[in-house]
DNA sequence: CGAAGCTATGTAAACGATTGCAGTGCCAGA
DNA sequence: TCTGGCACTGCAATCGTTTACATAGCTTCG
């Protein structure tokens, strides 16, 4: 089949050790040997067999990213960030989602234990209890970082956006426009992002002497469908808030779609603020005012952190890198009571 | 560190061969031995080292997917389909994008040659010439399938949607509504999908005795931005078509956004048809009439095809699996001249 | 009873690299 | 001339499995 290091050694009249050194530590062989070996290597397009190398070196040069749902386009930007950093360091990126990873009672860690990957970047803060426990095994925990989401109970380094600060920006913006009656369209109950963002809204409102309306929306997931469904609830409200802050852009877009279907206009009847700044936010009608989080950068940072961990850099188990967010003012917000 | 098969062998008083057999071919060992070994295995949480196994077995149990741009959310559904099928077969999915894969003149095939992966599913029909040539090497070509896009010159099995039929549906729909003056908002020049879809539009129009307007739009990429930019061109057209068929949903959404910004209404002033049926299509305002392609299924089929290839099933190099598409009529199309 | 066949296990050779250690040749300095 | 040091290179063990082949014991049957 394809040539091995032995073939190259034979063809260039040296030992396999020398071939190996030529490829991995060129400075340790003489120039003439190096040139001779490289000539043979190039001529035959030889590439080291990474399985053999990795077995010997005891590492995999690849990491696994776990997301709640691979089909969710939200994660693609994060993947891009991860991939960029990893590939620059010669590390491969495997992906899976929690569902398939846990299918059939399979361990989340099979990849780690089987030495298929050197580390894990987890984008799912909602892992079942059993999976969490596994991750905390001492020889495992040091090779895991969380990104975007995280475990409430902590225990792992993580990279996340400044969710609270984001919501403060959102509230300040709406209050500045004159809104007083602001609702929060929630994400899935118990989700760390939802918890954090909700707290951010509540705090910021309180700072203005305001409170959230008692009624709850959402509580399903971050999806477009959930947003649309929430619009139904909203419409049947007796006293409708003049503005809604959504836990995600997808929710916001779905919500706007639901409102539109029932004849309510954004922003004239309801001002809307999203969170994430997904690509479409700028292109929906009206363009969505939202809190921008830099998902690529988030991925890149998480990748960097994990690589350092793997390389052995001692990293406090609860190190948190918080990335700044910013307010993108677009067309979905305006002063209240324009009608 | 972690236990090896030798430890398990020692602890359960058998040879490594027996342990290996217990794990890989349980039917080949006696029940008593099997139970004894499994007890030790379970007790210590032993897992076979996949690097060693793969080295010995000469396969990687993983495949690489290459997309033009990992950050493009369009591909997430395809990943989900790929992953689902692969993981059910115990195969891992690595992802990368053409940019990083080709960075620094690196070979597209390094993964294949280095025995890191068993196969390649390529979602990029626009690979540079050098990369294409590499893929065609005899020992490589049999481990590659294309999905979604493909190489114009052929040479690889591929899975794709029925792009022509889709466009026929779109044209028929518009013509039925009464449109005669229909434009095509093109994707990137030379892209196989664009070529195919455009041909589909032209053919279908011809079948109705119609022709595309001479002027060209788009010719940039499939993105939201390109769609918005195209709206500018459209607006300055002397005789504006009453309907536009877009090469992708992203183009359509961007186009609608651009039209809206200039005061043109969809569908009242212009009817719009997209292609793909991305998730947001249903939620933009107005909801986008579009041609639905089942991206998850596309991924799943591609995965299945590749697995069969790897397993050695002889597959004609130009086998094409074409998936049906369907018309989703929503709010962005209506009879012309409503104004 | 002996040969043949079968089952269950062990022995040891791969798989394709990396790397500690030892050896070789050469040069400089005493 | 001898010795120590240096720059290269080779030998061989090792990483953790799988599996062809050999062996041993037990049935079965003529």
Image (spheres, coloured by chain):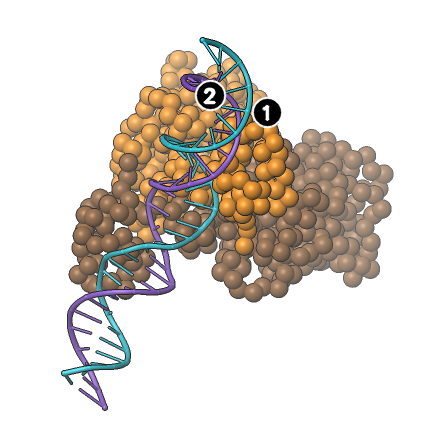
Chain colours: A orange, B brown, C cyan, D purple
Q: Chain of mark 2?
A: A
Q: Are marks 2 and 1 on the same chain?
A: yes
Q: Quadrant of residue A144?
A: top left
Q: Position of residue D7 (x, y in %)?
A: 52, 24
Q: Is there any visible trace of residue A329 in the rendered image? A: yes
Q: Residues within 10 Å of mark 2 (few under 14, many from 20)?
A: some
Q: Are marks 2 and 1 in contact (CB under 8 Å)?
A: no
Judge by depth and name the residue closer to the eye, A315 or B80: A315
Q: Chain of mark 1?
A: A
Q: Position of residue A54 (x, y in %)?
A: 43, 40
The tag on residue B328 is: none
Q: Residues within 10 Å of mark 1 (few under 14, many from 20)?
A: some
**Residue visible at 53% across and 43% down in the picture:** A9
Left or right: A51 as drawn, with respect to A279:
left
Q: Secondary structure at mark 2?
A: strand
Q: Could you tell me how far apart the alpha carbons at marks 2 and 1 are, in whole angstroms?
A: 22 Å
Which residue is identified by label 2? Answer: A323
Which residue is identified by label 1? Answer: A330
**Residue visible at 56% across and 22% down in the picture:** A328
Relative to C27, residue B108 above or below: below
Left or right: A305 as drawn, with respect to A285:
left
Q: Is there any visible trace of residue B275 in the rendered image? A: no
Q: Position of residue A137 (x, y in %)?
A: 27, 34
Relative to C7, residue A151 above or below: above
Q: Which quadrant: the N terminus of chain A?
A: bottom right
**Residue visible at 51% across and 15% down in the picture:** A176
Left or right: A55 as drawn, with respect to B140:
left
Relative to B253, residue A29 above or below: above
């Amino acid at each position: 089949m394809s040539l091995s290091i032995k073939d190259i050694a034979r063809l260039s009249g040296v030992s396999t050790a020398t071939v190996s050194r030529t490829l991995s530590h060129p400075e340790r062989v003489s120039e003439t040997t190096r040139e001779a070996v490289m000539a043979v290597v190039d001529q035959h397009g030889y590439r080291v067999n990474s399985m053999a190398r990795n077995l010997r070196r005891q590492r995999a040069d690849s990491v696994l990213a776990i997301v709640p749902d691979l089909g969710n386009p939200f994660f693609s930007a994060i993947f891009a960030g991860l991939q960029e950093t990893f590939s620059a360091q010669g590390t491969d990126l495997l992906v899976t989602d929690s569902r398939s990873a846990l299918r059939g009672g399979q361990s989340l860690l099979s990849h780690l234990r089987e030495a298929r990957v050197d580390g894990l970047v987890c984008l799912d803060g909602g892992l079942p209890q059993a999976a969490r426990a596994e991750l905390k095994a001492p020889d495992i925990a040091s090779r895991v970082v969380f990104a975007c989401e995280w475990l409430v109970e902590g225990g792992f380094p993580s990279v996340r956006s400044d969710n609270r600060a984001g919501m403060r920006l959102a509230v300040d913006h709406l209050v500045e426009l004159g809104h007083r009656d602001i609702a929060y369209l929630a994400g899935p109950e118990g989700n760390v992002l939802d918890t954090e963002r909700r707290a951010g809204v509540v705090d910021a409102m309180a700072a203005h002497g305001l409170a959230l309306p008692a009624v709850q929306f959402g509580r399903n997931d971050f999806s477009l469908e959930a947003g649309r469904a929430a619009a139904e609830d909203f419409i049947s409200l007796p006293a409708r808030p003049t503005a809604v802050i959504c836990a995600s852009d997808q929710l916001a877009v779905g919500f706007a779609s639901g409102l539109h279907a029932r004849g309510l206009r954004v922003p004239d009847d309801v001002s809307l603020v999203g969170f994430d700044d997904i690509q479409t936010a700028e292109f929906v009608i009206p363009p969505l005012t939202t809190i921008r989080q830099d998902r690529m950068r988030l991925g890149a940072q998480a990748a960097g952190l994990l690589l350092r961990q793997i390389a052995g850099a001692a990293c406090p188990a609860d190190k948190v890198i918080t990335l700044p967010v910013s307010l993108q003012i677009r067309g979905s917000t305006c002063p209240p009571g324009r009608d």
